[in-house]
Image: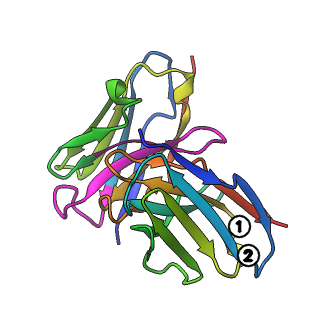
Amino acid sequence: QVHLQESGPGLVKPSQTLSLTCSVSGASISSGGYYWSWIRQLPGKGLQWIGFIYNSGDTYYNPSLQSRVTILLDTSKNQVSLKLSSVTAADTAVYYCARDLGPDYGMDVWGQGTTVTVSS
Amino acid sequence: DIQMTQSPSSLSASVGDKVTITCRAGQNIGTFLSWYQQKPGKAPKLLIFAASSLQSEVPSRFSGSGSGTDFTLTISSLQPEDFATYYCQQSHGSHTFGQGTKLDIK
């Protein structure tokens, strides 16, 4: 059974870089033809897709966040990381990672989410 | 970015009711459309993929239809555990979610 767990600082100062990790168990991030997505949910709001990384390392980011986002694979630890630079209060959200089966199949396994607050 | 517009934004219904939620894409996305259910404090759960395919272990009272720009999610007979927020999501290139439909008890 595949399990995803997000982790990282719950509080980040404005202008700094938000860094989160998604630890994957039950599947290898470097095989299987999967994408690994990051999604966030602003307080009381809907869902915003941040980007994904394919097991080859190819990435695709939300155009509205592209200039500030980096998603990487750490195959030695079976982890997917998210970095979001130059954060502001508008980046305060619950951040989720998810296994993305591709455009035909949706995101079938999600982590529980981690809350990040941007505040000085 | 492809915009996704869901309607209604909120809906009140009773146990046993049939409910339909619609989602309209800003351009043709074929069948690259998924539906998710989210309960408070929980991660979204995949219900439907490829517009009309039921995800494993999702009850058959959930169904999806549509292609191109217009899509629907139907719950044939509402159960108490179905009261939640529902999102559509397109995956034609980038991903975009609809704004959500909150389904609550009448």
In the image, is A17 to the left or to the right of B88?
Answer: left
Where is residue A89? Give x, y as percent: 57, 23
Q: Residue furthest right?
A: B106
Q: Are marks 2 and 1 in contact (CB under 8 Å)?
A: yes
Q: Circle 2 is placed at which residue position?
A: B80
In the image, is B40 to the left or to the right of A35?
Answer: right
Q: How far apart are labels 2 and 1 at the CA level? A: 6 Å
User: Residue at 22% of width from left, 56% of height from top?
Assistant: A29
Q: Circle 1 is placed at which residue position?
A: B83
Q: Nearer the viewer, residue A99 or B6?
A: B6
> In what element is the residue under mark 1?
loop
**Quadrant position of residue A20:** top left
Tag 1: Cα neighbours inside 10 Å, few (<14), some, or many (≥20)? many
Where is residue B14? Give x, y as percent: 81, 74
> In what element is the residue under mark 2?
helix
Question: What chain does badge 2 belong to?
Answer: B
Magenta stretch: give its range: A24-52
Q: Nearer the viewer, residue A65 or B25?
A: B25
Three-letter amino acid code at the position of disc 1: Phe
